[in-house]
Amino acid sequence: MRIFVKAFILVAFIIFAICLFRITPAKSFLTPETLGRFLEVSGYWGPLLFILIFAVSICLFVPASIPALLGATIFGAHWGFLYGWIGAIAGASGAFFIGRTLGRDFTRSLMGDKLTEYDDAIERNGFTTVLYLRLINSPFTFTNFGICLTKVRFWDYFFGTALGVLVGIFVLTFLGGTLKEIWVSGNWGKLVSFKVFFAAGLYVFSFFIPKMIKGIKDYRAWRYSRFIPARSGTGLQAKSTNELSAYDAQAGRQP
């Protein structure tokens, strides 16, 4: 019964969070003018409050691009990137603990043997899975709550997120910050600048990173597969016992 109560609370929380910034006037707070005035009055506490607002907004299903662009507009490209990156990690971590606490037990109760195998595989490859999902720009907030329902370890999730969102946050803040500078100065020639081309190029390159990671994993799997027939009695032998043991250790197997 307790499992269903927690699952109900999670569903109610998700519905409340989605409706909060789409139906109520709360969404008017996330504008450059309103948020900028609030942070300006906060003085030295402004950056910390912005990080907190970023984190809370992520937990409330606000698209990460909105606070990221707000950070670039208010703080500029460099500081906006740093504060946005920290805020994204904090928000993703908060969403993880909410979902893991309220929804994991219910999800586990629904799993059959096949889904349990997939769940175990995600746990073994947690960092790579999270990093891959972040790099392909999957919906940030929904990914947070989806991953936390699996067996992925928190630190795999944390570091995979921290590394995976670097590119996205960098592109959003640097492009947003540059566009703000251009708008204020009226110098549209800055659109043709190193920062703009670098951010755009990095964004395009980020789409190829998951394929590169997959290629490396496939290559390692192919190298390891050469030793599998030797264990099946087909007559193919590894070059040495030590080499086979090393491959077994990498794959998480016992020799």
Image (cartoon, rainbow, N blue to C red):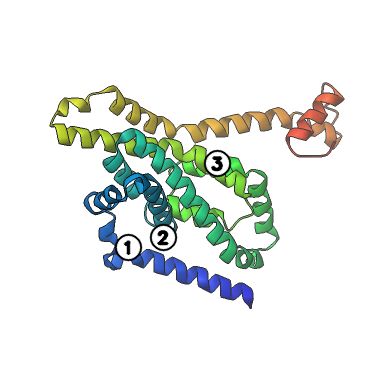
Choose top left, top right, bottom left or bottom right for residue 222: top right
Q: Which residue is mark 2?
A: 60
| Disc with the residue nearer the chain's start (2 vs 3) | 2
Quadrant where the image shows the N terminus: bottom right
For image coordinates 28% across by 38% down, the residue present is: 176
For image coordinates 46% across by 68% down, the residue present is: 13
**Crowdedness of circle 3 by 10 Å Cα count: few (<14), some, many (20+)?**
many
Q: Residue furthest left?
A: 186
Q: Which mark is residue 21?
A: 1
Question: What percent of the width, then of the height, locates residue 22?
Answer: 30, 64
Asked if the residue under mark 1 is in contact with the one under mark 2, i.e. CB atoms within 8 Å, the reply is: yes
Q: Residue type at mark 1? A: Phe
For image coordinates 37% across by 45% down, the residue present is: 47
For image coordinates 28% across by 60% down, the residue present is: 27
Quadrant where the image shows the C terminus: top right
- Numbered disc 1: secondary structure: helix
For the residue pair 155 and 113, the one nearer the viewer reads as 155
Residue 37 vs 163, above or below: the answer is: below
Asked if the residue under mark 1 is in contact with the one under mark 3, i.e. CB atoms within 8 Å, the reply is: no
Q: Which mark is residue 160?
A: 3
Q: Is residue 15 visible?
A: yes
- Numbered disc 3: secondary structure: helix
Distance Cα–Cα, label 2 vs label 1: 8 Å
- Determine whether, in the image, residue 50 is placed left or right of residue 146: left
